[in-house]
Amino acid sequence: MPHNKIDPKTFYAHAPKQPDTPWHTLDEHLNGVADLAAEFAGAFDSAAWGRIAGLWHDLGKARESFQRYLRGELNKDEGGHSIHGALLAHASSPRAPSFWEPLALVIAGHHGGLANLAGSDGVGELCSSSRSLVERLKQDDDRLAEIDTDTLNIERTAPRPTGLPSWLTPPREAQKKSEWGAFHLQRAYWIRFLFSALVDADFLDTEAYFDRDRATVRGQRYDEVPTLRTRLDAELDRLTVDAEPSQVNTIRAEVLEACRHAAEQPPGVFSLSVPTGGGKTLSSLAFALRHAELHGLRRVIVAIPFTSIIEQNAAVYRKHLGDENTIEHHSNLDPEKESVRNRLASENWDAPVIVTTNVQLFESLHANRPSRCRKLHNIAKSVIVLDEAQALPDRVLYPILDSLHRLVADYGCTIVLCTATQPALERTENLKRGFDHIHEIAPDPPGLARRLSRYDVVWPEKDAEPVTWDELACELNRHESALAIVHRRDDARELAMLVDDSLHLSALMCPAHRSEVLAEVKQRLETKRPCRLVSTQLIEAGVDIDFPVVYRALGGLDSIVQAGGRCNREGRGPRGRLIVFRAPTDPPPGTPKKGLETIEALLDGSLKIDDPELLATYFRNLRLKQHSDSRHVMAAHASLAFADVALRFRMIDDVAQPIVIPWDEEGKHRLDTLRRNGPNRHTLRALQPYTVNLYPKQLEKLHESTALELIAEQVLVLAEPFSHFYDIIFGVSVRDELYSNPGTLIV
């Protein structure tokens, strides 16, 4: 690289990739990042903090060794450049941890991630082994002298924050320990949001230098929230006028009007308790856009627990708002169909409507890596719609509730809990953690439930014996069309083998395979052909199917209600029947097993499934059985142990590991592309529709039989000689002794 355009008296941040491009000066970069970080942090009253973090974040580049590295005279930057700004923050105010700790944490972590402030607390394997910030500062204390702050004039000109944001006030020394604990949690979230403002500003300023085309695409503006609200209202008004007169359409119109009226209320926590078929998807969006417009909020974020329904909901939003205004951010998004604009906006959520998963939202709120955290500052001043709110996992429920409380209290957000079965999330005498008040949007939820009731429930007797699979299969065979939902994958397989002409769904089938089965189910139902489907509870995740009769294994009340949502869903035929039976097996451990125990205690043969008091009692009793912070996330958070928090907070247990199933020709093509081009974001995500998650014992069997092929050192594929271990009906089968198919070895 020629250096004839380099001024030896100037420090540079980045070397150009093209010979004719000017070098990126450090002064330009620091000030550019400072301006952006101040703008981003201004959304939560922290502009001065964002500015000084931006000005100091790359001070480690103001030294001769880094400049030699840029010029190609050294192979690498010895020791890195992120610690110097952190050292300066500490040296500037060593006796004021409220000043130096936040700055030092975000600056030191802007490449590698937020570290623990001090050591881990030693909770088993759930602790980070990386160096804490205090250790780094102590070990690298002499490195501050390496930087030339006089040449940059940064230290003297940087405006110092005069204090913490107005909403972040430490309790008085004499206050209770619990109030100090709440303050430390509050400060931890603020540091993570400040970190987000810095790393996104750094990404964007660097991208603008290296890739003008990407920056140009990113700079294309979206329609404003008021424009989207007007567009959606006009479309919903048209649909209401054109809708044929019916009880369901009358109720949907009432729910929509209630959402529009409730949008005028101040920001806070709302619930939308509407049964299946009541129009929650579009009515909640109508509330969110109107509420955002009236209260100056910046965007709407819709978080959905199940990837199986996220695409169908996003398609509804795109239809009414326009493709370019709805950003999908989830692992199931097919990269073959993803636009460049969607991909870029997924990095930092700079768009008016974001459709994502609960996993993406809440794990980002507890993450420590720059790429996961850079979107967080854009969550401030948003309306967050939590679809199927009852699905929040119990083992991390307290950290989730705390993060939601912080978003409302400190970051100007509004939360909408949208579900047919509202969980018990209000604070009570027995349930200390929760929201102080939740505003219900729906008009008369009990009345809505009665008016939208489309099926009758048959409960098992209190002391009834479990049915056998043979008995249940005989009952199912007497119906032209019926759905049976069971606890476990093995249950679904065993029952489906006994049912005549049955279809089968479970998580042992890859998503592409499941989509084919669902398409067949819908076609049979629409054409009035016999259709008997046996499924695990994955069918309850908002899948739009409509059976006249549904059998559901006795389990949690919320699951039973969700199963009922697949029964006479459209209300076009005679009343449906939801038959609840005792299965010969128990649900999986954890929430499913506790849900069964909780409903057993309430079972008396006359339960009314649409009674809101029954639901409230069920969820209160269930929460009393749960350990809602089993991994001690909140304790780690309060001590600013960011690496530990990221390690401990998992929405889904990561015991299972994915393997790739070349299910169809498209799957084989995508696998060949991976072999040819290697692993990258595009090739790996393209395989999502062809993966099945297996537990260690199943994987161990496959490994022992050499049935798995390792590609690109990270992708496990069911090898062709063992393709028969993926059944065309039941998916992955590792129940029997494994052997290869000799026919596949013949060339």
Image (tube, grey):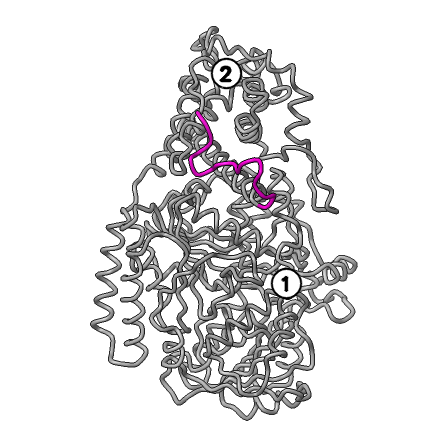
Query: Mark 2 belongs to which amino acid?
Result: Met
Q: Residues within 10 Å of mark 2 (few under 14, many from 20)?
A: few
Confirm or deny contact between disc 2 and disc 1 (CB under 8 A): no
In the picture, the disc for residue 285 is none
> In the shown orientation, is residue 136 left or right of residue 353?
right
Q: Give how far across and how far down residue 633 sits, in percent.
A: 62, 48
| Residue 205 visible to an observer of this rendering | yes
- Taking the magenta stretch, the answer to whether it contains residue 174 is yes
Q: Residue at x 49, y 38 (%)?
A: 190
Give whichever of 113, 159 is nearer the camera.
159
At mark 1, the secondary structure is loop
- Taking the magenta stretch, the answer to whether it contains residue 119 is no
> In the shown orientation, is residue 381 left or right of residue 493?
left
| Residue 677 visible to an observer of this rendering | no
| Extreme residue toward the top, this view | 9
> In the shown orientation, is residue 577 left or right of residue 47?
right
- Would you name the residue on which mark 1 appears? 626
Looking at the rendered image, the quarter that the C terminus falls into is bottom right
| Extreme residue toward the front, this view | 174
Q: Give how far across and how far down residue 14 sits, in percent.
A: 48, 21
Q: Which stretch is magenta? A: 162-178
Q: Residues within 10 Å of mark 1 (few under 14, many from 20)?
A: some
Give whichever of 405, 592 is nearer the camera.
405
Task: Give above or below for 482 relative to 718.
Answer: below
Q: Classify residue 76 by image quadrant.
A: top right
> In the shown orientation, is residue 81 left or right of residue 700?
left
- Would you name the residue on which mark 2 appears? 1
N-term mark: 2 or 1:
2
Task: Give above or below for 472 relative to 385.
Answer: below
